Every structure is written in structure tokens, then in C-alpha cells.
Image (cartoon, rainbow, N blue to C red):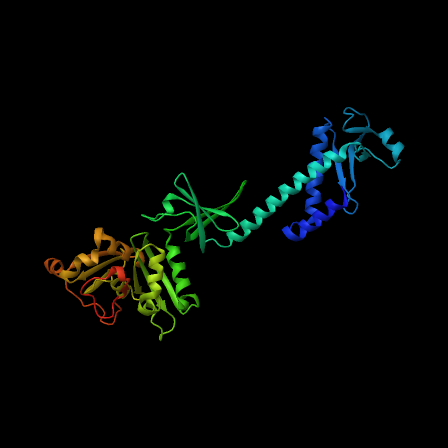
Amino acid sequence: MNEEFLAALQAIEKEKEIRKETLFEAIEAALVSAYKRNFNTAANVRVHLGRESGEIKVYTRLSVVEEVTQPQLEISLAEARKLDPAYQPGDVVEKEVTPKNFGRIAAQTAKQVVIQRIREAERELVFDEYIDREEDIITAIVQRMEQKNLIVDLGKAEAVLAPTEQMPGDEYRQGERIKAYITEVRRTSKGPQIYISRTHPGLLKRLFELEVPEIFDGTVEIKSVAREAGYRSKLAVHSRNKDVDPVGACVGPKGARVQSVVNELRGEKIDIVKWDENPEIFVANALSPAKVVSVRLQEDQKVASVIVPDHQLSLAIGKEGQNARLAAKLTGWKIDIASESQAADRGLTVRPADPGRDEGVTCPENNVPGLPDGMI
């Protein structure tokens, strides 16, 4: 090995953060295989690569025995003691067997090993970077489609957006920038495999963290998220500061903050409601934009029986039950909704809901005629 090669190893150590000693050991191991392959030998050999000189030496390792049965692997005690009288049975004798033309083979082998190690190190660095970003949001550039999988460029690596993780109606153009949520990073033989999602509830949460400073600094907390990607979502928020309105902070001036999230999610409707430690109030809030007259809880069955005005029943249930379904996901309670007339027919007593509860808000696309003043 010449001085230029040793200097290259030194540079690789600094630039790629691969220890030079690791490269030396890998080259030595590869040269053992190259020696056996090129010189048709099954002998037990060791290769030493000089750390300062770059000189390569090959040694055959022979076990000291009383009687030799495998000449390629053993040496008699008598022969060993001619070299050093201190040898005993079981010791190992090393003899240099470096071939004259081994330099060319060694250089080629070393080059291949170094290239391979650089690739492995780069893959490991990419894996380490993105494994720490699991459950985080990233910006990616659309590259191509492969069997309905969308391949996107993250800069140092590519990621896969599977069909099940794509939002309904999403259309992607090459070179377009999209935001996605990293769900998993796997280590594979071909390098790290990064899986992302546009449907995960975590994406909605991270988008609001980016848009709302009060969430980012911890003043406002997102307590729970329920999402049917591409259609509608509900977000329950709570303020640690009584002087900060959590719903208003998320909506932003003239709805700018929530609208920015809606635009990123291609028009997905978003309801933002106020979380409350009282489950009755929380369930009532979660059914926004519908008004709730009464909420009764069956703790043992985790069921909330809700009564709404007759004209609010369809709004509370939502299209194909979507509003009630999302409210149930958001609160963790099964919700049974009835109108006031239905409740009267069943002989149920109507108990007014807490008059101080926050009715919540919806994004502009959710505008419903007749909502209370102040609702978006």
C-alpha cells in the first residue's frame, strides 16, 4: 500500500467519520479471503497491514502437534522447536508466506473494501439521523410512483408513501413538496427504509405544532386527535394558562392558522374543540358544531347518552355518522345520540348541559348556517 492510499484512509476517517482502525481491520479480513481464493489454499492465514508503512505481510498459522496429520494446518513439535525451543503442543507458529505478486490483488481488494465500508457508514449515518425522527414531520419532494407506492426524496435518503398512507383524492406531481409523518425507519441490507404517512393523526398534530407558537412552547396542549384522513378531523386542545384561549390560539387571526393546516391537507375539514377534565362537558364539546342539551354517562360501560335539539340531530350525527364517530374517537366514550322528542318518547329526563361549556369551532369549510356568534 502506498502513502497516497494511507492518506486517503486518513481523509475518509475525517470526512465520513469511519475510524481508520476499522478500515484496516476490514481490509485485513478481506485480504485473507483474497489470498485463499487466489492461491487455492485452505491454510489458516493472517494478514497484517502496516499502519504507518502500508506494508502487507501474509502469515500462515500452524498449530504445534506431536504428529502432523494436516500439513497445511499443523507443524510437528520437533520442527517448531528448531525455530524456538520454547514451543509446546497447542502453541501456534506463524510463518511469513507473502506472495511476490500479492500487491496488485491487495490494492484491488482494499479499494473494494473501503468503498463498501463507506457505503455502509453512510447508510448507518442516515439510519441514525432518521430513526431519531420517527413520529416527526418532514418535508419531502415527490420523485416517482412505483406500483402505487409514492417515492419521495428527503435529501439524504428516499422514503416510501404506501397507497394505504395516501389521502383519498391526493394527486402528486413530480418535484412537488409535501409534508408527511415518519411512521417507521427500518434497517435493511440495502440501507435504511423510511416509511411515511399522510393519513396518520400524528401529521395533524405536528402541523398544528408548526403553525401555533402556543402549542410549540407548551402553553397550549393537544390532548387528543381523531381523524378520517381527507375528510374530517377533530382536535381537542387545553391551555395551561387561563389567560390563553386554546381554541382561539389554534384558529389564529381570521382563521389563518387553521386554514394553513387545511390547505396542507388539501381541504380536509377540521373541528377544534376545548378539552375538559369533566367527561360530560368534553363529550358535549366534541360533538361541535351541534348544540347539546344533556349528557349522561354510564361509567361502567363507558357510554355517553347525549340529547340534542330535534333540529340538531342530523348535525350531531353527521354525514354517515362521521361527526359522532369522530367525537367518540376523540373522547374515548361510546356516544348514543337522541333528539329531545326521542328522549321524551323514551321517558328520559332532559338535564341541561353545562351552560359554561365552549361550543368549539370548525374550519371555514365546515360553516353551518345557524351556528352561534363567534363560531367559524
Looking at the rendered image, the quarter that the C terminus falls into is bottom left
Q: Position of residue 15 (x, y in %)?
A: 64, 52
Q: Quick one: 265 or 172, which is closer to the camera? A: 172
**Viewer-nearest residue: 1 or 137:** 1
Look at the picture and state if 355 lies above or below 174: below
Q: Is residue 228 above or below residue 37?
A: below
Relative to 189, is 297 on the left or the right? left
Task: Identify the residue shown where x is 38% and y is 62%.
Answer: 208
* Left or right position of 373 against 130: left
Q: Residue furthest top?
A: 69
Q: Position of residue 284 (x, y in %)?
A: 24, 63
Query: Which residue is found at the position 89% from the left and 32% from the top?
Result: 82
Q: Position of residue 248 (x, y in %)?
A: 32, 69
Q: Position of residue 240 (x, y in %)?
A: 38, 71
Vertical placement of residue 366 versus 63, above or below? below
Can you say which quadrant of the picture contains the N terminus?
top right
Residue for point 37% across, 54% down: 201
- Residue 298 showing in the rendered view: no
Which residue in the rendered view is the most extreme toward the bottom? 243
